[in-house]
């Protein structure tokens, strides 16, 4: 079974920084893409950032210039570096791995809470 384990969440003040980590039980190159999603109370889950097998990255508009997704292939780990955090960034952040060539299948981590507040 594929396992994704997030870490690095916590409570920070506005303008602060956090780095989230997603450790995988297998090579990240086994997946078509690795993504970070987030879900705030009462809101829909949204894609925050993603990185494809080939290394292309995408970002949700509100986090462009503040968040950076990266990977350490040797450690089978994907990171989300978050700077200039805003209260609106408060959410549970989930690591996601996309598998399948014809039929898509998504693996999910348990989530890590990020709270941005004074």
Image (cartoon, grey):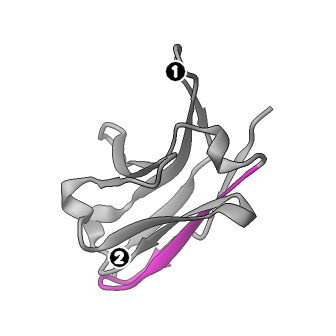
Q: Residues within 10 Å of mark 1 (few under 14, many from 20)?
A: few
Residue 100 vs residue 12: left or right?
A: right
Residue 33 vs residue 1: left or right?
A: left
Q: Mainly helix, strand or loop, the magenta region?
A: strand
The percent position of residue 70, horizontal first and vertical second, equals: 50, 65
Residue at 78 percent across and 47 percent down: it is: 25
Identify whether 115 is placed above or below 84. above
The percent position of residue 53, horizontal first and vertical second, equals: 52, 46
Please give the label number shown on residue 104: 1
Residue at 30 percent across and 85 percent down: it is: 15
Q: Is residue 47 visible?
A: yes
Q: Is residue 9 visible?
A: no
Residue at 24 percent across and 73 percent down: it is: 65
Q: Quadrant of residue 99?
A: top right
Q: Among all residues in the image, which is located at the extreme left?
A: 61
Q: Quadrant of residue 10?
A: bottom right
Indicate the quadrant containing the N terminus: top left, top right, bottom left or bottom right: top right
C-alpha separation, residue under disc 1 versus residue under disc 2: 37 Å
Q: Which residues lie in the magenta part?
A: 11-24
Residue 69 vs residue 31: left or right?
A: left
Indicate the quadrant containing the C terminus: top left, top right, bottom left or bottom right: bottom left
């Amino acid at each position: 079974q594929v396992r994704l384990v997030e870490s690095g969440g916590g409570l920070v003040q506005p303008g602060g920084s956090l780095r989230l980590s997603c450790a995988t039980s297998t090579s990240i190159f086994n997946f078509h893409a690795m993504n970070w999603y987030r879900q705030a109370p009462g809101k829909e889950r949204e894609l925050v950032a993603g990185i494809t097998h080939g290394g292309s990255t995408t970002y949700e508009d509100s986090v462009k210039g503040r968040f950076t997704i990266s990977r350490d292939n040797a450690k089978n780990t994907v990171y989300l570096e978050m700077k200039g955090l805003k209260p609106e960034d408060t959410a549970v952040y989930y690591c996601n791995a996309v598998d399948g060539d014809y039929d898509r299948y998504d693996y999910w981590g348990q989530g890590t809470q990020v709270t941005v507040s004074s």
